[in-house]
Image: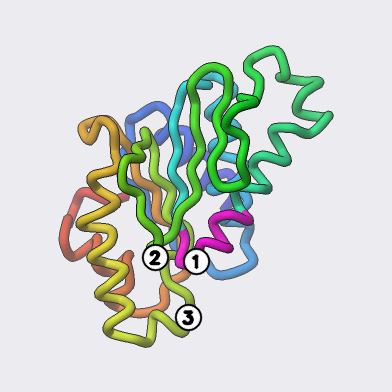
Amino acid sequence: HYDYLCEHLTLVKQRRLLRLIVNVPPRTLKSTIITIAYPVWVWLTEPGHNFMAASYSRELSTEHSLKRRTLLQSRWFQQLWGDRFRMSADRNQVDQFMNTRGGEMIATSTNATAMGRGCDTAILDDLLNVDQALSSAERTRTNNWIDSTLRSRLDEPAIGSIILVMQRLHELDPTGHLLEQEPGAWT
């Protein structure tokens, strides 16, 4: 499934695919490939690209952000691609960092505010945990966050992309919600 997943991520990068849902079981490297490695890969050719990555908790999205930043700052990465951009010294936090070419990566959650922040690509990685998926109130709150907060964060909605990656947890989880709200819009 790695090759198939990377083919679809390539289409998102090329903006030939703007809405992608990836539903795979736990422990299949979905977060490593999509949430950690994909934004780093995009920055190699589009260092001005802005990403917002959200999860059900601030801790999880911050952990993903830290892994992205660690990869970008690794000796291996710097030896191969360090000439393309540098990390910005004045904005280099765990949950929000920039490069010297204007690209930004922001980590947030469905419980945090995203006001005043925008992105070219939003990555939604596990917006619900297993316990939250069993709660009608939590599912509704998360789906409302997608509809009201997230969608307004795309800098250019006509070409901005959204990637949802998660395991299926309920018929009305974010995957079910998006497929019901926008039939035919999501791959």
- Which callout, 3 or 1, points at the residue further toward the start of the chain? 1
Residue 126, compared with residue 152, is above or below; it is below
State how far apart marks 2 and 1 are (Cα).
7 Å
Residues rendered magenta in the picture:
55-63
Q: Indicate left or right for 179 with 35 as reference.
A: left
- Which callout, 2 or 1, points at the residue further toward the start of the chain? 1
| Secondary structure at numbered mark 2 | loop
Q: Indicate left or right for 46 with 184 as reference.
A: right
Q: Is residue 171 magenta?
A: no
Give the x, y percent position of residue 79: 81, 20
| Secondary structure at numbered mark 1 | loop
| Secondary structure at numbered mark 3 | helix
Residue 49, compared with residue 84, is above or below; it is below
Label 2 with label 1: CB-CB less than 8 Å: yes
Quarter of the image holding residue 93? top right
Disc 1 designates what residue?
57
Disc 3 designates what residue?
130
Looking at the picture, which amino acid does disc 2 mark?
Asn
